[in-house]
Image: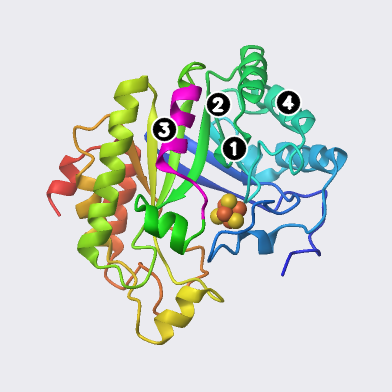
């Protein structure tokens, strides 16, 4: 159920991405699993510890990041770092604020060109006290901005709260955006394309269109930089979706349909990043990546780096 065998002195994993913000280092720390833990279909907690991981172990994990050869080799290129623990980095009980402070102070020493720190969290941990704290520390580091990253998954209330049990209202998301605007923080919202069975491609595109319109409205109303991170759904092993897929009740999305959804962001006040990695976790035939998709993947990677909609019009 949980991952109790990982060395608590080492982070869980890291990888690099490239976006219009430059090179991004994505780090997942090994901590106590998400304390919400009730989202249907979520298996992230299976990678994390059932027990609290103390701050000394977290500091050793951070030291590991700053001494890892693969990371050091690209340290001069990194423009943005995303911190995750497959749950909520701002949940003090799973990730100590001492460790977060330690990380923020050391960023400048090891990654001299990093300007943005993105923190994955559920919105309920983004308190005024927490934002005051982050804003204060940021001023003493090389970081120019903080981004609060939340998993929304679907714009449809029914899919998000009834089928996924996210317990997250659209009003709460807008309230979060309004709160962070006072500190000039950015916001990143993770969505999934066609996340459930019995959803047509048209419904999937419409859901993303609603998300784009909502986030565009919030970005304008509160003057906040917003990134929509769109992950095409893949059928992960061991999930309910995998059983439905095996019964023929679900077909993974096609990349060209995702392109149709992304095009709707043209002229809106937000950036869109398309996740193109199924992490090798898809069951056979359950990935959105299919033979012959190489050209589309390349174009979407280029779009992620440039936000150039002309690339998509050609498809
Ligand atoms: S909040 Fe995130 S990590 Fe926690 S159960 Fe839900 S999807 Fe999983």
Answer left or right for 89 relative to 247. right
Structural distance between the alpha carbons of marks 2 and 1: 27 Å
Camera-side residue: 127 or 248? 127
Q: Which residues are magenta?
A: 166-180
Q: Where residue 174 is drawn, which disc sits there?
A: 3
N-terminal of the pair, mark 2 or mark 4, is 4
Q: Residue at x 52, y 69 (%)?
A: 281
Q: Left or right? Give the position of 42 relative to 106.
A: left
201 part of magenta stretch: no
- Quadrant in the picture for residue 304: top left
Say which element carries label 4.
helix
| Quarter of the figure with the C terminus | bottom left
Q: Is residue 185 left or right of residue 74?
A: left
Tell which circle, 2 or 1, labels the residue nearer the N-terminal end: 2
Work out whether 250 lies above or below 303.
Answer: below
Q: Which residue is mark 2?
A: 114
Q: CA distance from mark 3 to mark 2?
A: 28 Å
Q: Is residue 173 magenta?
A: yes
Residue 124 is marked as 1
* 10 Å crowding of disc 3: few (<14), some (14-19), many (20+): some
Disc 4 target residue: 101
At a point 50% along the width and 24% down the height, the residue shown is 180
Q: Are marks 4 and 1 in contact (CB under 8 Å)?
A: no
Note whether residue 303 is visible.
no
Q: Are marks 3 and 1 in contact (CB under 8 Å)?
A: no
Residue 215: where, in percent of width, then height? 33, 35
Question: Is most of the magenta stretch helix, strand or loop?
Answer: helix
Residue displayed at 77% across by 50% down: 10
Judge whether 2 appears above or below 283 on screen. above
């Amino acid at each position: 159920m949980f991952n109790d065998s990982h060395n608590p002195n080492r982070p869980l994993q890291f990888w690099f991405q490239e976006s219009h913000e430059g090179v991004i280092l994505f780090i997942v720390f090994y901590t106590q699993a998400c304390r919400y833990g009730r989202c249907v279909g979520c298996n992230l907690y299976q990678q994390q510890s059932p027990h609290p991981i103390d701050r000394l172990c977290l500091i050793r994990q951070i030291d590991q990041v700053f001494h890892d050869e693969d990371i050091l080799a690209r340290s001069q290129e990194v423009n943005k770092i995303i911190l995750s623990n497959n749950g909520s980095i701002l949940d003090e009980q799973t990730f100590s604020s001492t460790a977060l402070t330690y990380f923020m102070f050391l960023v400048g020493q090891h990654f001299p060109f990093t300007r943005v720190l993105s923190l994955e969290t559920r919105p309920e941990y983004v308190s005024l006290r927490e934002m005051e704290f982050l804003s204060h520390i940021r001023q003493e580091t090389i970081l120019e901005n903080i981004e609060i990253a939340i998993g929304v998954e679907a714009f449809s209330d029914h899919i998000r709260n009834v089928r996924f049990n996210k317990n997250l209202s659209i009003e709460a998301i807008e309230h979060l955006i309004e709160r962070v605007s006072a500190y000039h923080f950015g916001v990143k919202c993770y969505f999934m394309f066609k996340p459930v069975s019995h959803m047509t491609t048209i419904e999937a595109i419409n859901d993303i269109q609603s998300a784009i319109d909502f986030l565009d409205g919030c970005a304008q109303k509160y003057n906040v930089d917003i990134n929509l991170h769109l992950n095409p759904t893949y059928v992960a092993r061991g999930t309910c979706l995998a059983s439905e897929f095996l019964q023929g009740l679900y077909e993974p999305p096609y990349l060209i349909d995702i392109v149709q959804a992304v095009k709707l962001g043209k002229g809106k006040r937000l950036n869109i990043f398309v996740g193109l990695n199924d992490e090798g976790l898809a069951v056979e035939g359950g990935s959105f990546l299919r033979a012959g998709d190489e050209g589309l993947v390349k174009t979407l990677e280029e779009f992620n780096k440039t936000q150039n909609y002309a690339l998509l019009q050609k498809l």
